[in-house]
Image (spheres, rainbow, N blue to C red):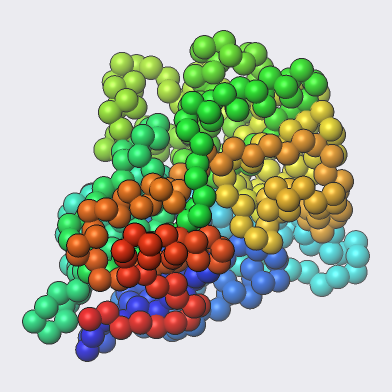
């Protein structure tokens, strides 16, 4: 039986990455991410799988971001008992991030249900709990990069560094098909060259097929130098107004990267020495995990750590775990920088900071990453005059600034450059993980550069031969 792939999640959209590979009676799930969006659709889509979870033999996980890993607790709740294969760093990160995801869902539902009760509406329930998330961790197996792992007699996987976030990988799946082997690379998400902290993306050996992200398939990022200058300008102008800079950020990678740049600007005395808070217990835990995985560092980060430097600002920046300290920040009128999760503003402490601060024109909401459709983050990016937070309406009067160059996703030119070594070998590239317009623009670019590319539809199944 020829290998087949079914495109389930993050197809012509960004969140909820999930793809099912079948071969000779085996079923392998690649990623199991949370779809993020409006609350009703979020609950419906994440609660139901278009396959029987108990029939899946293994889940291959590319990295720990919640839109790639966050629905694994639900997968286990629904009957999955197979192996979850990931890099060592991804396994460590998921041990912190998935229970945190369950805890946040429980806390957010408590807050929502208070509002529902006051309006006479029925109570909600969380998608899964912290206990559900802790249960799924027993199925994780951590592996180093470049080790070939046998899943069964017909399928193996090898992880190559994706350079996207700590522990991120391009899994290379090798599947026997009679007397030949089909080689499928999963470059979702793909990182960037010459970005601080992490190694550059690796290129696996010759491949037949590739799944490729398209988050920025039609866009270009600014240079690192321009990023620092823009960050400096935003901080200084907000401080001059006496305001706060509120930065929604993924606890994994984006927080560490923006802290890295803020630390440099402070050392170079290009911004005033105002308080900087990383208000996320998860980000604190992730920063500690960063320090345990030097195999993921680039040469500059490795040298800084060996020299006893403080590139992540752990001695200069205030890392907050306590909820009362978090609440106190909203009572403090001093200029400050607050970096808090979640990255798309859909849950966690950032929602409370936005609720308390977006109505003041002195303040700035600094967006440093992609915001998916139908998220609070996207509504802020689009500068809607009134936004809903926990079902209540708030005027958006704060300044909104955007720096896309912090993105850990490759842009169009970086993707095309990455693909050059594969031009003579890859049979077809499947474009996923991008809003439809960005996916279509990348499809066009790939065609113009001589690649055979295809943009699947949700639920489409393709034979690999």
x, y percent for residue 117: 86, 64
Q: Please count the marks in the image.
A: 0
**In the displayed structure image, the side of residue 351 where residue 421 appears, left or right:** left
Lateral position of residue 64 relative to residue 450, left or right = right
Q: Is residue 393 above or below residue 81?
A: above
Question: 330 or 240: which is nearer to us?
Answer: 240
- Please give the name of the residue rendered at 82% of the width and 72% of the height, measured from the top-left corner: 122
Does 92 sit above or below residue 333? Answer: below
Q: Does the image show residue 306? A: yes
Q: Quadrant of the N terminus?
A: bottom left
Provide residue 462's location: percent of width, then percent of height.
Answer: 35, 82
Residue 288 picture location, percent across and down: 43, 34
Determine the image quadrant of residue 297: top left
* Residue at x-position 44% and y-position 51%: 412
Please name whichever residue, 10 or 293, is drawn nearer the observer in this view of the structure.
Answer: 10
Q: Residue furthest right?
A: 119
* Up-down relation of residue 99 to residue 333 (above or below): below
Q: On the rendered structure, is 295 left or right of 453? A: left
């Amino acid at each position: 039986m020829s290998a087949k792939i079914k495109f389930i999640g993050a197809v012509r959209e960004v969140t909820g990455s999930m793809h099912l590979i079948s071969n000779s009676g085996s079923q392998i799930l690649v990623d199991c991410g949370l779809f993020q969006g409006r609350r009703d659709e979020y609950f419906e889509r994440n609660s139901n799988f278009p396959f029987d979870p108990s029939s899946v033999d293994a889940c291959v996980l590319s990295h720990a971001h919640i839109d790639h890993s966050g629905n694994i607790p639900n997968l286990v709740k629904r009957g999955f008992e197979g192996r979850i294969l990931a890099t060592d760093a991804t396994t460590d990160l998921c041990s912190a991030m998935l229970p945190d995801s369950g805890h946040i869902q429980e806390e957010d539902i408590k807050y929502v249900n208070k509002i529902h009760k006051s309006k006479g509406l029925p109570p909600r329930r969380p998608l899964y709990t912290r206990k559900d998330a802790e249960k799924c961790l027993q199925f994780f197996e951590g592996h180093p990069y470049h080790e070939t792992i046998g899943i069964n007699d017909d399928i193996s996987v090898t992880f190559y560094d994706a350079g996207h976030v700590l522990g991120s990988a391009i899994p290379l799946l090798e599947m026997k098909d009679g007397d030949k082997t089909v080689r499928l690379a999963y470059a979702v998400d793909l990182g960037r060259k010459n970005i601080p902290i992490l190694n550059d993306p690796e290129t696996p050996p010759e491949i037949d097929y590739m799944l490729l992200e398209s988050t920025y398939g039609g866009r270009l990022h600014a240079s690192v130098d321009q990023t620092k200058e823009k960050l400096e300008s935003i901080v200084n102008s907000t401080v001059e107004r006496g305001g706060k800079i509120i930065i929604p950020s993924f606890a994994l990678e984006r927080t560490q990267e923006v802290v890295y740049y803020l630390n440099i600007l402070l050392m170079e005395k290009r911004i005033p020495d105002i308080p900087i808070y990383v208000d996320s217990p998860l980000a604190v835990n992730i920063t500690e995990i960063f320090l345990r995985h030097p195999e993921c560092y680039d040469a500059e980060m490795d040298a800084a750590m060996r020299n006893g430097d403080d590139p992540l600002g752990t001695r200069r920046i205030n890392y907050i775990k306590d909820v009362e300290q978090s609440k106190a920040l909203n009572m403090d009128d001093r200029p400050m920088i607050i970096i808090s999760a979640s990255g798309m503003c859909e849950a966690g402490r950032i929602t409370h900071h936005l609720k308390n601060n977006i109505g003041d024109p002195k303040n700035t909401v600094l967006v440093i990453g992609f915001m998916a459709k139908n998220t609070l983050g996207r509504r802020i990016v689009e500068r809607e005059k009134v936004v809903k937070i926990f079902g209540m309406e708030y005027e958006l009067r704060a300044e909104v600034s955007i720096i896309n160059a912090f993105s850990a996703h490759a842009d169009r030119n970086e993707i095309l450059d990455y693909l050059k070594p594969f031009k003579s070998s890859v049979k077809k590239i499947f474009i996923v993980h991008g809003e439809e317009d960005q996916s279509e623009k990348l499809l066009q670019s790939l065609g113009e550069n001589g690649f055979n590319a295809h943009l699947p539809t949700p639920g489409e199944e393709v034979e690999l031969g």
